[in-house]
Every structure is written in structure tokens, then in C-alpha cells.
Amino acid sequence: MTGPQSSPPALAWRLRAAMFTRLFAIQGSWNYETMLGNGVGFAAEPALRALPGGRGGTAYRLALARESDYFNAHPYLASVAVGALVRAELDGQPPAQIERFRNAMCGPLGSLGDRLVWAGWLPLTALIALLAYGLGAGALTVVLLFLALYNVGHVGLRAWGIHNGWHGGLHVAAVLGHPVLRQAPLYIGRAVLFLLGAVLPLVIRRVLVSTGELPTVAAAGSPGGITAAIAALVGAAVLGGIFVRLHGRVEGWRAAIVVLAALILYSLAR
Amino acid sequence: MTALDLLAPVLLGALLGLDVVSFPQVMISRPIVAATIAGALAGNVGAGLLAGAVLELMAMETLPVGASRYPEWGSAAVVAGTLAAVRDVPRSGALVVAVFAGIATAWAGGWSMYGLRRLNGGWAERMQPAVEAGSWRAVVGLQLRGLTADLVRAALLTLVALLVWRPIDRWLLSRWSLDLVVSHSILVAVAAAAAASAIWRLGHGATGARWYLLGGLAAGMALVVLQ
């Protein structure tokens, strides 16, 4: 690594905007060979035009080829790598150093993104939407609440990533050690557990209560409705325990399809 | 369903299938969004939302992590939302069959994404000399080709799933014998179990995990009683 990063070079606003927009399609050609590699090249390409010789120049071609090589990370946090790599290319860092940096960033950006987004933010926001549904919110409210909440985090993370990558350059790794990033998955995980507990009885109730759009189910206050709701909750607890025990051998949705197939067959055979 | 009736859900399935991985991943492909929009297009937004909520619980397990093969819920939720909403006369078992069709489509969608990734890999291999020469046309071309192929994949998946499931749905519901409350109770119990096991596996290592879960459960039960 070189010494502390100096101020970033000037980069036209439209080139930054193009890079940011292209980040949303970074997985467009995802494959098992180069994974995100071509997507990183695709996202970095607008900024590489600022290299000496412009688009088609030798520096541009060498840099684009380098940036389109194998890369794997979480798609949102790949923005950190794109910003840092573009900065390194425009700063004229040695190619071997850029390649080492690319390889070193794959693991941390992948595992942090998976914990923060896929195992944290996504279930959290989905459960908040389901909570709203369970509390009786309408379709528009549920959908807009989920999309707004989720994308505040999603778009914010991409913007944060490219900003910090661009400013940090090859020293951006320090940013990933920020306490917020390290602690957030822990707190989100606890919130997700609490929300799950709150959501299940509410959603079960709403599915069982007449909504007017599907055939009328026994009203919540009727003995039949209460019995069904309690039976569903107990059934969910028992089945959930079985699914947890089966972990590693079968996923919940696969087990669910078997149970539902059995239910359909039973209904036909009766 | 006429060809015109199929056009809207197929186009929606294509767009939402694209959102799952390729572009823009803003999660309009999550079942609670996708099935609701499909229901609205089919003329019954409430039925779509109901199917979406149940499928969302099932989809909690899916972590779209890199190279793993996982169900494709975007196009699948469009199929489930459409099936839940299109019927003229609501019937017992309708939600069960719609959700079942959704999960089956999601499973098939997972395989179609695996095929797409292999296809992308083949294209990347063929274009490798041009990419290594730093050709922007090759880099941008690969990306656009992959995006287009994903759009077509999702459209075909939605079309085939609707063509297959619509008659099956009608046939099954004409012979459905279970009571509505029983059908819905079992369905929502299965979905809740899938969600609970998925979230528990993600978070059970946290200190006091079971207390957070039990605290939430108590809060949820209290809200049910208050409602």
C-alpha cells in the first residue's frame, strides 16, 4: 500500500452519475466464471474515460480489462470497490497493487454485505411490512412502506460505498471497520427476532379473518375463528421446531411444498 | 385467460424477475410487493396482498447469496398473485393452490437462473479475448446481453407457469373438499413455521435471542387481543 491518500482528482459529475446508475446493473452478466467481474468493469467504465488518451486509449483499455476480471462481493457493497478501484486507476497506482487490492476486497465486502443486507436489513424491512399488514394496513401502505424503508438502506449503502471508495482509494478498508457497520448486524438481528415474534400472531389472525377480497373466514371473535388462530399458531410452533431440526437437510420452503402437496391431495381424496 | 389477459402478468413477471438479481434489485420482486401488484392488475388487490403476505413468510428463508441456487420469488409471486385474484367466484382452497403454484414456480425459477448464469458464463468465455483487450463494446455488450436474457427468462417462466397452473388451479378447486378455515389455518401455519425457522437460524446465536423472540410474541399476542 502507498501512503495516506491525497485528495481525489476531479471527476465530472455526469461520469459519477453514470457510474452510480450502472451500479444498479452490476449483476447483469453474473456467471460462475467471472461472477461480478464484468459488472465492475461496466460500472467503472464511464470514469475510466478520464484516463490519458480517453476512451480507446492504451491506459483506458488496460484499466478496463483489469477491472472486468473476476470479482465477487455483495452487489451493494461492490460500490466501495468500484469507487476505490476507479480512484486507484486514475491515480496511476501500479497494476499489481490494484490487482492485489481487488482480490483482498472480495471476502470482506461479501461477508459484511451478506450479514448486513441479506440477513439483516431485508428481513427487518420485510417484517415491518408484514407487521403493518398484520395491523390491518392496506395494500398501498404495506407495499410503499416496505419499498421506501428497504431502499433508504439500499440506495444509501450504494451511495455511501461509492463515495467512500472514491475518497479512500486503496485505503478504503479502514472504512469497513466502522463501528456502525460492525455492530449494525447484531442490533438488526435482535430487532428481527422481536419483530418475528410480534408479526406471526398478527399475520395469522389477518389471514384467518375475513378481508372481503377472499371468501369469508370465520370472524376473529367467533369460537371457530379463535380455535383456528390458536391451532395455526401452535401448528406453526411445532412445524417451525421441526424445520429448525431439519436444518442442513431440507429448507423450510421445500418442506412447505411437501406439506401443501399433501394437503391438496388429502382435499382431493376426501 | 386470453392472450391479452396474459400480456400484463407476463410483462410484470419479466420486470420483477429481472429485479431479483440483475437490475435494479430494489426488491419490487419481493412477494409482498410482486403478488400485490399482480393482484391489482388482475382486478383484486386484496387477494394479491394476501397471497403475497403468505409467500413473503415462505421467502424469509431465501438469502440471495452469490453462487448459491435459490428460488426466484419475483416471477413466482406474480403467478401466485394472479391466480389468487383472477377467479370470478372465490372458492375454498384458492389461496392454498395459488401459494403452492407460487412456490413451485419459484423452484423452477431457481433452475432457470442457474441456466442463465451458465449461459452468461459461455458468453463471457467467448468474449474473453475482447474483454482482455479492453474493448468497451465487449464489456457493455456482455452486460446488456445478460440483462436481456434475464428479462426473456422471467417472461417465459411467467408465461409457462400461468399456462400450466391456470387449468390445474381450476381443476383442483372444482374438486376441493376441505373447509376454508382449515385450509387457511394449515397454510398460514406452514408459512409461519418456514419464516420462524429461517429467522431463528439467522439470529439464534445472539445473546438473549429467545427472549427477544418471546418478547415479540407477547407483544404480538397483546396486539391481537387489543384488536
Image (cartoon, coloured by chain):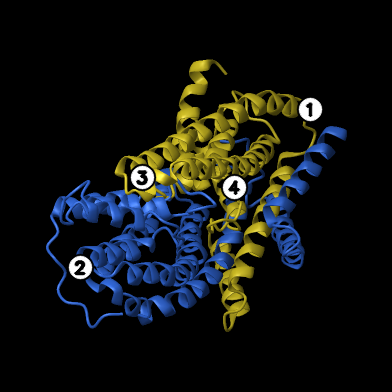
Marks 2 and 1, Cα distance to the nearest angstrom? Answer: 70 Å
Q: Is there CB contact under 8 Å for labels 3 and 2?
A: no
Residue that appears at 59% across and 37% down: B80
- Percent x, y of residue B104: 67, 40
**Residue bearing mark 1:** B175
User: Given the image, what chain letter belongs to the residue carrying mark 3?
Assistant: B
Marks 1 and 4, Cα distance to the nearest angstrom? Answer: 24 Å
Q: Colour of chain B?
A: yellow
Q: Earlier in the sequence, mark 4 or mark 3?
A: 4
* Nearest to the observer: residue B87 or residue A162: A162
User: Given the image, what chain letter belongs to the residue carrying mark 1?
Assistant: B
Quarter of the figure with the C terminus of chain A: top right
Q: Secondary structure at mark 2?
A: helix
Q: Secondary structure at mark 4?
A: helix
Quadrant housing residue A152: bottom left
Task: Answer few, some or many: residues within 10 Å of disc 4's Cα (few below 14, many 20 plus, some between 14 and 19).
Answer: many
**Residue bearing mark 2:** A91
Q: Earlier in the sequence, mark 1 or mark 4?
A: 4
Q: Is there CB contact under 8 Å for labels 4 and 3?
A: no
Task: Answer few, some or many: residues within 10 Å of disc 1's Cα (few below 14, many 20 plus, some between 14 and 19).
Answer: some
Quarter of the figure with the N terminus of chain A: bottom left
Q: Is A134 rendered above or below residue A109?
A: above
Q: Secondary structure at mark 3?
A: helix
**Residue bearing mark 4:** B55
**Three-letter amino acid code at disc 1?**
Arg
Foreground label between 1 and 4: 4
Q: For residue B139, which numbered disc appears in the image?
A: 3
* Nearest to the observer: residue B113 or residue A155: B113
